[in-house]
Image: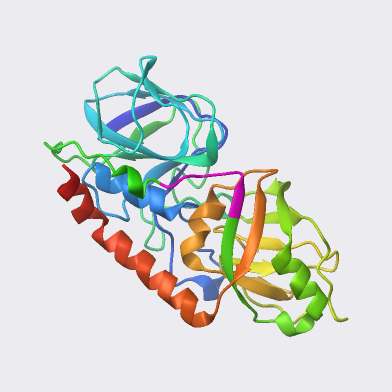
């Protein structure tokens, strides 16, 4: 069903779901939403499944025209959405009429917003996912970001009768100073004690050389013991590489699947959503946790996502 037409595409708008799993051995990245919590919340607010495809926008939001009556939800970074120049709330179910124009203001916090359509976005499954991988030119809308004139289709389903709103205490607050938890390793033995202390006790700035593939950080140099290369091994989102210049690189959702720089640490998976909203000049600090603590955080995050639907319904 034809649902939306792109009047203005914004800076970088793609179709994303929770990602493409099981194909790393073939060199296929996971991709998917940079902020998985916001995508899941957007889907649940319109009665979709958690993994349905949404629109992910970056920095500058799009202008879209509704081709049919529909329901949407907008989550993620604070982006001042409007319908026909009238402000609408984020983190809520919103009714849209045929012909309405949906637009966005400047991004006040965070850098990515998510737009869920009731029924989910209808693009072909590629290796089990509808996520766009632009570098590989597959998934989403023909493997590219959306452009002027594109028509976004959704699956035809009945509209939900209840309008949901995420409780205020569950809405994440995105700031310019982000603290993420990390587990040291797997190559932390390649760094001096002073280098590890530098990494854990200083703030790093996100540079302009940052995108869905990874974030290059600027700050104090992390000292290696000597050798600065390894035989290339597996990379996953959240891995923190340190090349010979001593400046950390955080691997994100569209990253290559192997790499030859030593990894000083790995970001706890539940904190990747926060990093997914980081923008250039934001400060990032790394806080060490144990494997047991990381597992506990991961389990708590999974339980929270699993219960989110019930919490939404209970709040109405």
Q: Residue furthest top?
A: 85
Instruction: Say which of 113 and 164 sits in front.
Output: 164
Point out the image quarter for the C terminus.
Answer: top left
Q: Quadrant of residue 182?
A: bottom right
Q: Residue furthest bottom?
A: 189
Q: Is residue 172 visible?
A: yes
Residue at image position (74%, 85%) is 189
Q: Quadrant of residue 154?
A: top left
Color scheme of the displayed model:
rainbow
Q: Is residue 151 above or below residue 136?
A: above
Give residue 195's position: percent from left, percent from top: 80, 73
Give residue 139's position: percent from left, percent from top: 45, 52
Q: Mostly what secondary structure, the magenta segment?
A: loop
Q: How many marks?
A: 0
Q: Residue furthest right?
A: 226
Q: Quadrant of residue 127?
A: bottom left
Point out the image quarter for the N terminus.
Answer: top left
Give residue 177's position: percent from left, percent from top: 62, 49
Q: Is residue 5 above or below residue 39?
A: above
Residue at image position (65%, 73%) is 265
Q: In the image, 226: left or right of 196?
A: right
Residue at image position (61%, 61%) is 255
Q: Is residue 247 above or below residue 120?
A: below
Q: In the image, 222: left or right of 67?
A: right
Give residue 105's position: percent from left, percent from top: 50, 24
Instruction: Say which of 115 and 191 sits in front.
Output: 191
Specify start and end residues of the magenta stretch as a single range: 172-178
Q: Within the magenta stretch, is there residue 124?
A: no
Q: Within the magenta stretch, is there residue 176?
A: yes
Residue at image position (40%, 48%) is 38
């Amino acid at each position: 069903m034809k649902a939306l037409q792109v009047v203005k595409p914004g800076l970088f708008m793609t179709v994303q779901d929770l990602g493409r799993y099981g194909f790393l051995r073939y060199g296929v990245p996971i991709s998917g939403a940079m902020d998985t919590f916001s995508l899941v919340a957007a889907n649940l607010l319109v009665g979709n499944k958690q993994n349905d495809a949404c629109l992910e926008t970056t920095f500058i939001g799009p202008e879209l025209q509704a081709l049919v009556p529909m329901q949407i939800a907008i989550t993620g970074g604070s982006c001042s959405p409007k319908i026909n120049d009238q402000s609408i709330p984020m983190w809520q179910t919103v009714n849209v009429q045929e012909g309405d124009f949906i637009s966005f203001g400047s991004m006040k916090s965070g850098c990515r917003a998510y737009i869920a359509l009731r029924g989910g976005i209808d693009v072909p499954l590629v290796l089990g996912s509808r996520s766009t991988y632009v570098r590989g030119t597959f998934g989403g809308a023909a493997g590219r970001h959306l452009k002027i004139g594109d028509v976004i289709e959704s699956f035809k389903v009945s509209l939900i009768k209840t309008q949901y709103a995420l409780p205020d205490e569950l809405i994440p607050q995105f700031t310019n100073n982000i603290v993420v938890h990390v587990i040291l390793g797997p190559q932390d033995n390649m760094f001096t004690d002073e280098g590890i202390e530098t990494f854990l006790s200083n703030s790093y700035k996100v540079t302009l050389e940052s995108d869905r593939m990874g974030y290059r950080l600027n700050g104090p140099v992390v000292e290696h013991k000597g050798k600065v290369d390894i035989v290339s091994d597996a990379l996953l989102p959240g891995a923190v590489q340190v090349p010979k210049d001593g400046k950390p690189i955080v691997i994100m959702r569209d990253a290559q699947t192997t790499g030859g720089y030593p990894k000083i640490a790995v970001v706890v998976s539940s904190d990747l959503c926060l990093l997914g909203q980081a923008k250039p000049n934001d400060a990032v600090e790394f806080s060490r946790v144990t494997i047991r603590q990381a597992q506990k955080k991961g389990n708590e995050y999974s339980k929270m996502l699993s219960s989110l639907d019930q919490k939404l319904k209970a709040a109405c």
